[in-house]
Image (spheres, grey):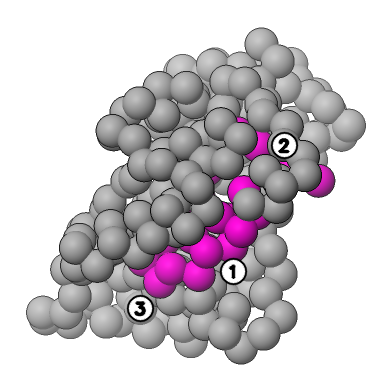
Amino acid sequence: MGRIFEKRKYSIFKTAAQNSKLYSKYSKQLYMAAKNGVPDPSANPVLRNIVERAKKENVPSHVIDKAIQKAAGAGGENYQPARYEGVGPGGSLVIVDCLTDNNTRTISDVRNCFTKTGAKMSANGSVAMLFDHLAVISFSGDSEEKVLEAVFAADVAVDEVESKDGTITVFAPPAEFYKAKTALREAFPGLEFDVQEITFLPKEAKVLGGEERAMFEKLLGMLNECDDVQEVYHNVTLP
């Protein structure tokens, strides 16, 4: 199918402020997953997936444990998901996923990022329709056939399996994410996932240069500095 997919490698944060942003991001996700399910990763696949991702990004165990323990208590914050879409510099497409306890603050912060970089927010769904919403699982391997056999045997509805440069990537509907992970781990004991996420992949890539590229990178930087922003998806090809 020629999907546009680059193995997601999250930035290695080096400063205390950047570490704080990363920890805050995962603390919210862990809290909500535990609050909406059960505060036990072994019995909550959503929570287990976030714990695995957090550990891969070197989030300390005490940060993970604190967020889960907090959710196990009474009361606490009530974060809600919020998604904003827009057209960025040079006609780039941007989707911003947030977790917020104050929608007015969050939309104001996101709108400010768009406004200061010459970008415009759009109606919900107008940008997302130009992306594929998919579960993506990537790991080291070279036998596409064995992977297909494993997922089909487990009755997993997979969109596509790609093999490239010693890496296998499985694309599936979001609803099949946890079923696909379970099937792969049962078929290949000890398997480690390089990527395991539900994401938006652009149907067409955009290349920017000059001032447009600089302004787009400024937009990304501003969005990533917003406390409520969890993920930013876009269609721009970056090095």
The amino acid on which the numbered mark 1 sits, given as a three-letter code, is: Lys
Q: Measuring 52% from the left and 19% from the top, which residue is drawn there?
A: 158
For the residues carrying marks 2 and 3, which lies nearer the camera in this image?
2
- Select label 1 or label 2 by which is in front: 2
Q: Badge 3 local density, few (<14 within 10 Å), some, or many (20+)?
A: many
Query: Residue drawn 19% across and 75% down?
Result: 77
Crowding near the residue tagged with mark 2, few <14, some 14–19, many ≥20 C-alpha atoms within 10 Å: some
Q: Which residue lies under the disc numbered 3?
A: 67
Which residue does the numbered mark 2 point to in the structure image?
208
The first of marks 2 and 3 along the sequence is 3
Magenta segment:
216-239
**Element at label 1:** helix
Amino acid bearing label 2: Leu
Q: Where is residue 238 in the image (x, y as percent from the top left)?
A: 74, 43
Q: Earlier in the sequence, mark 1 or mark 2?
A: 1
In the image, residue 46 lies in the stretch drawn in magenta: no
Residue at the top extreme of this rendering: 1
* Element type at mark 3: helix
- The answer to whether residue 206 is seen in the rendering is yes
Quadrant for the N terminus in the image: top right
Disc 1 designates what residue? 55
Q: Amino acid type of disc 3?
A: Ala
Near-viewer residue (200 or 119): 119
Q: Earlier in the sequence, mark 3 or mark 1?
A: 1
Q: On the image, which quarter does residue 227 sit in?
A: bottom left
Residue at the extreme right of the image, as rendered: 165
Seen at 28% across and 34% down, the residue is 124
> Quadrant location of residue 153?
top right
